[in-house]
Image (cartoon, rainbow, N blue to C red):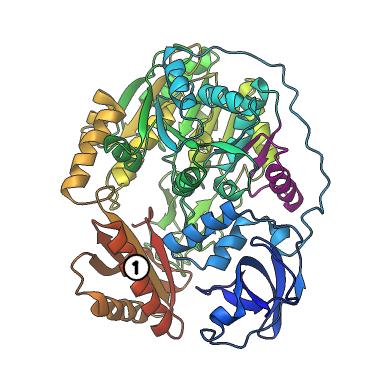
Amino acid sequence: MRNLVTVALNLPIYSSFDYIMPDEHMVIRPGSRVEVPFGNRKLIGIILNSKKMSYVIKEVKYKLKNISKVIDDVPILPNEIIKLCLWCADYYQFPVGQVIFSSLPPKLRKGKDINSTETNIVKNKSNSSKFNLNKEQISAFKKIKSKIGSFSPFLLEGVTGSGKTELYVKISEFITEKKGQVLIIVPEINLTPQTLNRFEKYLNCKIDSYHSSLSDQSKLKTWRECSHGNIDIVIGTRSSIFIPFKNLQLIIIDEEHDLSLKQSEKFRYHARDVALIRSKNNNIPIIMGSATPSFESLYNCSVGKYTHLALKSRYFKTKLPSVTVVDLNKDSPDEGFSSELIRSIQKELDKKKQIILYIGRRGFSHTLLCTKCGWTSKCLRCDAHMTYHLNENKLWCHHCGFQTKIDIKKPCGCSDDCEIIPLGQGTERVEAKIKKLFPNAKVMRIDSDVINNTAKLNDFIDKTKNNELDILIGTQMLVKGHDFPGVTLVGIMDIDAGLYSLDFRGLEKIAQLIVQVSGRSGRHSSEGKVLIQTRKPKHPLIIELLKNGYNSFSNKALLERKSASLPPFSYISLFRVSALNKKDSVNFLSKVKGNFLNSKNVKILGPSPAPITKKNNRYFYQLLLSSSSRKFLLQKSYEIREYIINKKKGNIRWSLDIDPLDLY
């Protein structure tokens, strides 16, 4: 009797499908690709398992069809990755086929031959630069080394500049010398070149990167060679968690607190949490490093799930930067610049040092206002204002992406002469002002408008390290994990928006930002200085954080989370619905809530407006589920998901986010 195989397809359907093997003597192993008929189409699928036809024939509710074509003689996905994808599909409640196909390089998704790229993996020829670990690093190294070959989660908390990367290098060297492989995940593409360079400087082994900016050909080559054991270390972004390894012995998550490790659309997984599952499945250690650990990781240390390692001093023995809080109520800013900040910049320029100015928004200003008629540059598609970009003379909605050119002298149609003023500061406005204040300084703006490929990123890093720049202006892209030896002053232009966020994680995020941005200053030979501009200098967060440090702040904030039964002391999921009509969104979620309201173990909050209620002409509302039990939360989320699938009509769109980070 012929056998059946279960096939996962790249479709938004929460089930796999059975197909008949073309030959009763043929064996197709799980992880192989096949071409199968689906409706009037032929699709590529991945084999999950096989079974006897007699075992399932009575349960199949559709006509069984034959496999059209076998693509792979040898599976492209090992059982380990299939197991990981099945866990992700179950936990994050996302279609299993789409989970598996999202983990594959683009060429493999399209059915291309896995051997269609040339093999050209060159062993890194470093100068074998050496460095010595300090006492704290040696202690941490010994503890990690003793757990090689067993599942052991480590939280490595080290002050900025404490040498976390040097510790990563040493433990990676120990593993690769024993023919093991290491996966290092960083939160942003722009951190991969710097991390890659630092590893290549010290290690004589095969190191490669993996992220979305690489060509499809490069991704396929890295995927294949890594699975064959021809690459020792992979440094990549969150998608690299699904790369198959021949002998993976360690996973490192750098900047484990960073929100970029969580995918924000479609398959909403958290790379750190998936990495924990993979390390457990493979019985290997995992290191999660940060100067500002997430509250979830600190909580897991407190209950004994993680081992807490601390690096309390800077590697180059420089002092932590001094911090000055500038009260903008007293030192009134001129286009974002207090007199204290201007004086401090001039002092560092006189000493031939470098300065970083951090501002959280790109563009010139948050919005434009006409003082004559009251017009503002509001997006017609969203409940948001359009950012003015001076260099391109356009308004740009950073939510739906709509852009339009404007006549800045008369954008609103006033009968009289317009009086247009920009409201708020963005990176362009800070850049324009700094060039007026310091015309002889070499200035560069670093945001996604300017740095939009790897070549430009590498050029910026090289210019900074070669002292070809004096003042760096940028968003988080500039400050995440970068090591600039010449920077001695960091100016944080404005933190007030983050102090009063509606998100319960708002204070955690702004505290992490302050510490991370401050950590770019004075990392090597000179003591640094940090200026924080705010109109709320007496805010409890600022006082606690600056007086007693991040650890003390996080301990107090965790007590507040506990009293309010908020994560990590509870578990949450988020259903978000959108429709072309506001009432349709609200009414649909109200019906959903009405059908599941009588739940003892799960609270259902809402319907409430999403952070941006109107986006791209659709109205977004949400339901928040909360429970002290992960099991009950996942079960209730599953029940509501099935209800929505069966009941949604018309233009209703929906999404489910397990462990959401973006609530408000």
Q: Residue extending furthest front?
A: 1
Q: Is residue 661 above or below residue 36?
A: above
- Which amino acid, by three-letter code, is at mark 1? Ser
Q: Is residue 209 magenta?
A: yes
* Observer able to see residue 384: no
The image shows residue 432 at horizontal and vertical percentages of 53, 37
453 vs 534, left or right, is right
210 vs 55, left or right, is right
Magenta-colored span: 206-234
Quarter holding the C terminus is bottom left
Looking at this view, is 439 or 182 the one in front?
A: 182
207 vs 327, left or right, is right
The residue drawn where x is 66% and y is 15% is: 129
Quarter holding the N terminus is bottom right
Residue picked out by circle 1: 637
Looking at this view, is 340 or 56 the one in front?
A: 56
* Observer able to see residue 507: yes
The residue drawn where x is 56% and y is 60% is: 406
Q: Is residue 310 above or below residue 613?
A: above
- Which SS class for mark 1? helix
The image shows residue 503 at horizontal and vertical percentages of 30, 52
The image shows residue 179 at horizontal and vertical percentages of 66, 30
Q: Is residue 83 magenta?
A: no
The residue drawn where x is 51% and y is 61% is: 86
For label 1, count other residues whose C-alpha is less than 10 Å away and answer few (under 14), some (14-19) or many (20+): many
